[in-house]
Amino acid sequence: MNRIASRLNRPRMTEAPKQPFRGAPDFWKSYKWNEQECIERFTQNFISVGGHVAHLASMEDVSVFIVDKARELEAKYLVRQNEPDLEQLQLESKLPDAKIAVWNSGDSEPAYWKERSAEADIGIVMADHAVAYTGSVVVMSSPHKGRSVSLLPTVLMIIVPVDRLKTRLGEVLLQFDELGPGQLPAGIHFISGPSRSSDIENDLTIGVHGPGIVYALVVG
């Protein structure tokens, strides 16, 4: 450290610098957008990283949107989380020519569901939280909400109820902190648009490590 300080032509620090602030400042903790602002900012930020956003009034409208996209993409195989809210979509009856798989239903082994998700044209999940300021969607795993549904299909549809859309990331992280380590799920995934990867020459490639097309369907 003495050598580094001498090379920088500055005196060696012997005491730790004072830190009058720790964590987010008070003004940021109280920073909040109204519902319409959250929707607009989330939409702008999600689109800016290559995602797609649709603002829909009801789950019925979500069902129509997914069915139309599935037909447009000629999707033959869809996989969704095993959640009651997603049963409202009634995709089985609306897409009779496609196979609809429901995560962890039946007696199949876990590896079976991972393989099915990797083969799926479209994966459908419910967002647990969403953050307008960063354009991120949070999806947590559970026995009925396998992480593979959001990570492996070619196209991902994330349904975001508007009441789960927050202004700041801290509003979401605080809830995880309150749960404590013993109650946290095995996976907490922050999704900001499609999978993006760049090599050392900064050549951007979409969809290498996950879905190449991601839709956030804001409902309400």
Image (cartoon, rainbow, N blue to C red):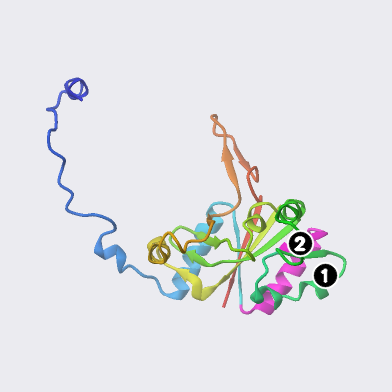
- Residue type marked 2: Leu
Quarter of the image for the C terminus: give it: bottom right
Q: Where is residue 153 in the image (x, y as percent from the top left)?
A: 70, 54
Q: Which of 163 and 18 is in front in this view?
A: 18
Look at 65% across and 46% down and name the residue there. Answer: 207
Task: Identify the residue at image location x=73%, y=51%.
Answer: 118
Classify residue 146 as left or right of residue 76.
Answer: left
Looking at the rendered structure, which numbered label has been put on residue 95?
1
**Stretch of the chain drawn in magenta:** 57-79
Residue 188 or 21: which is nearer the viewer? 188
Dot 1, crowdedness within 10 Å: few (<14), some or many (≥20)? some
Instruction: Give the mark nearer the N terminus: 1 vs 2.
Output: 2
Instruction: Spot the residue most to the right.
Output: 97
Looking at the figure, which quarter contains the N terminus? top left
Which mark, by number, is residue 78? 2
Give residue 162's position: percent from left, percent from top: 52, 74
Residue 111 vs residue 21: left or right?
Answer: right
| Residue at image coords 12%, 27% | 11
Please tell me whether mark 1 sits on a helix, a strand or a loop: loop
Amino acid type indicated by mark 1? Leu
Q: Does the magenta stretch include residue 203?
A: no
Q: Does the magenta stretch include residue 66?
A: yes
Residue 139: image quadrant is bottom right
Relative to 118, 56 lies left or right: left
Secondary structure under the numbered disc 2 in the rendered image:
strand
Q: In which quarter of the image is residue 59?
A: bottom right
